[in-house]
Image (tube, helix red, strand yellow):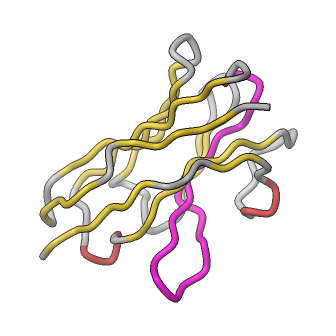
């Protein structure tokens, strides 16, 4: 089974940028559809973005469209989320997750392996 480790979180100013990374080990990343989710205190985990196995298809939450770019480098077994112009409401723990579904899912229930999360705090 694949293991996932996120990095790149921290404190960022609104309007800046940051890139989150998700490094995989144990199995080849290309086996999985990959997704980013986030969870703020007191809120449910929500879908942010996802990318197909080959990287040819992507899907974004409305809140991330135009500001985020999900990508993957299967040769490096790593997935990324570039977030531009972050807002205070983007503050959350961000998780990467792997799915074996045939099509890109948006429900966290269809992702079966999760990283431990990385905290992103956006200051105004």
Q: Quadrant of residue 81?
A: top left
List the single residue furthest toward the top.
75
Percent of width and height locating residue 56: 62, 27
Check residue 34 for magenta coloring.
yes
- Can you give x and y, in whole percent of width and height, for residue 84 in the image? 25, 51
Residue drawn at x 15%, y 66% as measured from the top left: 14
Placement of 1 over or under 67, stated as above or below: above
Which image quarter is the N terminus in?
top right
44 horizontally vs 10: left or right: right
Total marks placed: 0
**Quadrant for the C terminus in the image:** bottom left
| Magenta span includes 121 | no
- Residue 7 rendering spot, x and y as whole percentages: 39, 42
User: On the image, which quarter does residue 98 sit in?
Assistant: top right
Residue placed at 51% from the left, 20% from the top?
Answer: 73
Vertical placement of 8 versus 118: above or below? above
Residue 71, compared with residue 87, is above or below; it is above
Q: Is residue 100 left or right of residue 87?
A: right
Q: Quadrant of residue 91?
A: bottom left
State the residue at coordinates (72%, 31%): 2
The x, y position of residue 69, in whole percent, is: 41, 42
- Near-viewer residue (46 or 67): 46
Q: The magenta stretch spans which residues? A: 30-49
Seen at 35% across and 70% down, the residue is 90
């Amino acid at each position: 089974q694949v293991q996932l480790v996120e990095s790149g979180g921290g404190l960022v100013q609104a309007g800046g940028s940051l890139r989150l990374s998700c490094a995989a080990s144990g199995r080849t990343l290309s086996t999985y559809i990959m997704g980013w989710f986030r969870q703020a205190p007191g809120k449910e985990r929500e879908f942010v973005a996802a990318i197909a196995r080959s990287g040819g298809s992507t899907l974004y939450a409305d809140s991330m469209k135009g500001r985020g770019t999900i990508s993957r480098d299967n040769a490096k077994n790593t997935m990324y989320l570039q977030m531009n112009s972050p807002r205070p409401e983007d503050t959350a723990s961000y998780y990467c997750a792997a799915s074996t579904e045939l099509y890109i899912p948006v429900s966290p229930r269809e992702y079966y392996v999760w990283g431990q999360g990385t905290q992103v705090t956006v200051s105004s």
